[in-house]
Image (cartoon, rainbow, N blue to C red):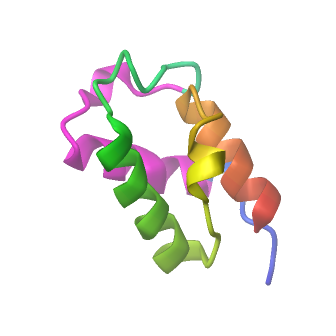
Amino acid sequence: MPTLEVTQVEKHVYKALESFGAEPTELRPEATFKELDVDSLDLAELSQIVEEEYGVKIKSSDVEHLKTVGDAVELIVERS
C-alpha cells in the first residue's frame, strides 16, 4: 500500500470532524479535540472512518494519547 500524504489524510479527517459539529474555521493541526468539542464517541467514529477509508486501525489505547487533530493525522500517516 502506498504511503498516504498528510494533506490527503487531513482532508478526510477535517471532513469527518465537520460532520461531528466542529467549525470548519477552527480546523487546523494544532487544534485540540477538546477545543473542537469532539468527544470520545466522535473519536471512536473517526477510528471507524479511518479504518474503512485507509485500512488503518486506531485502538482505544491510541485514542487516549491523541490530543490534537495533527496527532491523529500523524498516526494515520505513520500506520499507512
Residue at 67 percent of width and 56 percent of height: 76
Let me know if residue 26 is in the magenta part.
Answer: yes
Residue at 35 percent of width and 59 percent of height: 45
Query: Horizontal placement of 52 versus 19: left or right?
Result: right
- Residue 51 pos. (x, y %): 53, 73
Residue at 54 percent of width and 46 percent of height: 10
Decide which of 51, 13 is in the foreground and name it. Answer: 51
Residue at 32 percent of width and 47 percent of height: 42
Query: Horizontal placement of 5 versus 44: left or right?
Result: right
Query: Horizontal placement of 44 versus 71: left or right?
Result: left
Decide which of 59, 52 is in the foreground and name it. Answer: 59
Let me know if residue 54 is in the magenta part.
Answer: no
Quick one: which residue is furthest to the bottom in this view?
A: 1
Main secondary structure found in the magenta portion: helix
Q: Is residue 65 above or below residue 62?
A: above
- Residue 40 pos. (x, y %): 37, 41
The range drawn in magenta is 8-28
Query: Horizontal placement of 12 versus 39: left or right?
Result: right
How many numbered marks are there?
A: 0
What quarter of the picture does the N terminus occupy?
Answer: bottom right
Q: Is residue 66 above or below residue 36?
A: below
What quarter of the picture does the C terminus occupy?
Answer: bottom right
